[in-house]
Image (cartoon, rainbow, N blue to C red):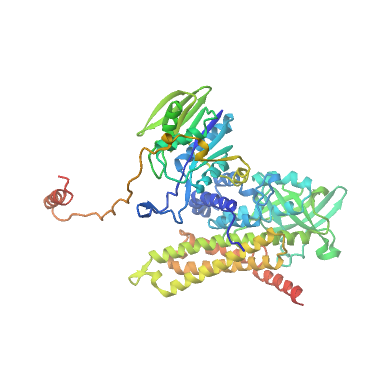
Amino acid sequence: MNFELSEDIKFLKQSIKDFIDSEVDPLAMEIEEKDEIPEKIMKMSKEMGLFGLSIPEEYGGTGIGMVGKCAIYEELGRTHNGYTTVIGAHTGIGSVGIVEMGNEEQKRKYLPKMASGEMIGAFALTEPSAGSHATNLKTTAVKKGDKYILNGSKHYITNAPIADVFTVMAVTDPSKGAKGITSFIVEKDFPGFSLGKNEKKMGLRGSHSAEIFFEDCEVPVENVLGEEGQGYVNALKILANGRAGLAARNLGSCEKLLEMSVQHAHSRVQFGKPIFEQQIIQHYLADMAMEIEALRSMTYRVAWMVDQGMKVIKEAAMVKLLGSEVYNRVADKAVQIHGGIGYIAEFPVERFYRDARITKIYEGTSEIQKNIIAAQLKQQYL
Amino acid sequence: MNILVLVKQTFDTEEKLVIENGAINEDGVEFILNPYDEYAVEEAIKIKEESGADVTVLTLGPDRSESVLRTALAMGADKAVFVELEEEVDEYTLSKYIVAAVKDQSFDLILGGNMAVDSGSGQVAIRVAEEMGIPHVSTITGLTLDGNKATVERDVEGDVEIIEVNLPFLATTQQGLNEPRYPSLPGIMKAKKKPLERLSVEDLELTDMDVTVRTSVQNQYLPPKKQAGKVLEGEINQQVQELFQLLRNEAKVI
């Protein structure tokens, strides 16, 4: 057993940490106020190679494994979560489908531009009637000659307003249920594709989600991702792959909150002494640190399992669940330790608290993760 | 165009210095590429990107210092030379080693940081120029190459001096020259495949005379802790009296 990150990964992690600390974090308040990522930061992030995290070197990406990706996500998690989400949604669910299921031609066409950030990716599964019940899709795809004609709509699609390429799940055979779903690569310029308005969200400002519409949208047959009828399996694979990454982002946010909380407890004086001297505050901090450490161990272990090619359905669900729940508990304690200042929008704790909430919902709710874990237990023990 | 960049690994500027038994304690300390050397590396890579050049980076030091070469390679340098050197030597000997390490190569331009943030001597690079018999320009904030000539702007205590110099020459870089890039993720991955030549001091075949240090550090200590300031109160005449007394009797400057 070796719990050390390799020298290469430490180097990558340090470089991203320097970049985030010096260039991105000082602008976190500006991102929050303007609800947008400054163009300069987007450009620099692309130059840093952050948009090619999931893409193999031969297609212009970084080609690092899941452990390396998690090390970088951990650093990204320490800053504004909206910024992290723009990159995370692109490098995770937005591009992994093409990397894992795309054929050579599709990879050559899309991946180099996605790696450089010239093209942004998004993942479109969720519909008004298909959230946790993901197989209940109403978007249809009918084959006509060398095209599929898509009709329907998707909502809450992260990155939709800036995305160029969407991985879209649609029903090709309603009689087959989950096995009648197919995934497609849809470009924003395909005829019949349109974008709805941006949703106003509780947090994750700077990252935008919107509805997308397909009205007789024409998708060439060569843009089927994988095989027809495999769309639901593809979606599950894409989501499972991203789960350790989500946990790593939450891990970074938790560490930042712990760091701020310890510093605040040390400097805030009440009853004539720093509040750190109060046993209750020490216990809060100890609980936070312990849960963060458990999250770190699990995150990197699952990432390592992914890199070994092991089956991680159960473990990925567990780490997504733990990461989201720990982040919310840590954010709650951080606000409590900070007191009034933790509720004021001029300070980052309040932002992390709001941004934490979505992690229990997106890419599979905490409840759905438990269902996945239980289904795996059934297979394992019965 | 061949460019050599001299770099050094230094303490992270945010580290606290701890001195134990007259030596600086390195336990748990983060080491970085000397910030002034970052300008030198960046400038070399900019020249490479604009007009083509082969950029070699060189450092000397204990095993750990190899990491600054990896940083420079990740930023975009082409190859690296590492001279493993365990003991502390002075600037005289260092410059002898550097010149010996690259004696079989020729360079049109040599760049290095204006000084290292740890020792702050600002001598090694210019001694190398002297050894090689080429001109040097220190603390540059601008560099324009035109064929065999270069126009260099240098920082002279807040003013700018403009100098024309023929290649080959050596320049030491100052803040304001450029904005050093961060090593990008693809840059870091590519750096792993770039050539890195490792040399020992024995490989350099220098005479005992050359490697005998001319200066050595006798003692090092931290500056005394700063005392809290004193604010005088009362009538202005009284304050002046008191100030005079303090300067004379306590500070002993009058």
Tally the marks.
Answer: 0
Residue A346 appears in the figure: yes
Q: Describe residue B117's horizontal placement relative to residue B229 as left or right.
A: right
Spot occupied by residue A131 in the image (x, y as percentages of width and height): 71, 65
Q: Describe residue A98's horizontal placement relative to residue A293 as left or right.
A: right
Quadrant housing the N terminus of chain A: bottom right
Residue at the spot 70% in from the left edge and 45% down from the top edge: A59
Q: Residue furthest right?
A: A145
Q: Quadrant of residue A294?
A: bottom right
Q: Residue furthest front?
A: B208
Spot occupied by residue A50 in the image (x, y as percentages of width and height): 61, 49
Viewer-proximal residue among A183 and A22 = A22
Viewer-proximal residue among A149 and A41 = A41
Q: Describe residue A343's horizontal placement relative to residue A57 as left or right.
A: left
Viewer-proximal residue among B214 and A199 = B214
Q: Residue furthest bottom?
A: A382
Residue at the spot 65% in from the left edge and 48% down from the top edge: A62
Quadrant housing the C terminus of chain A: bottom right
Spot occupied by residue B40 in the image (x, y as percentages of width and height): 49, 36
Q: Quadrant of residue B231?
A: bottom left
Figure check: A320 above or below B174: below
Figure check: A246 above or below B38: below
Figure check: B114 above or below A102: above
Figure check: A279 above or below A363: below
Residue B173 appears in the figure: no
Viewer-proximal residue among B105 and A169 = B105
Spot occupied by residue A238 in the image (x, y as percentages of width and height): 72, 58
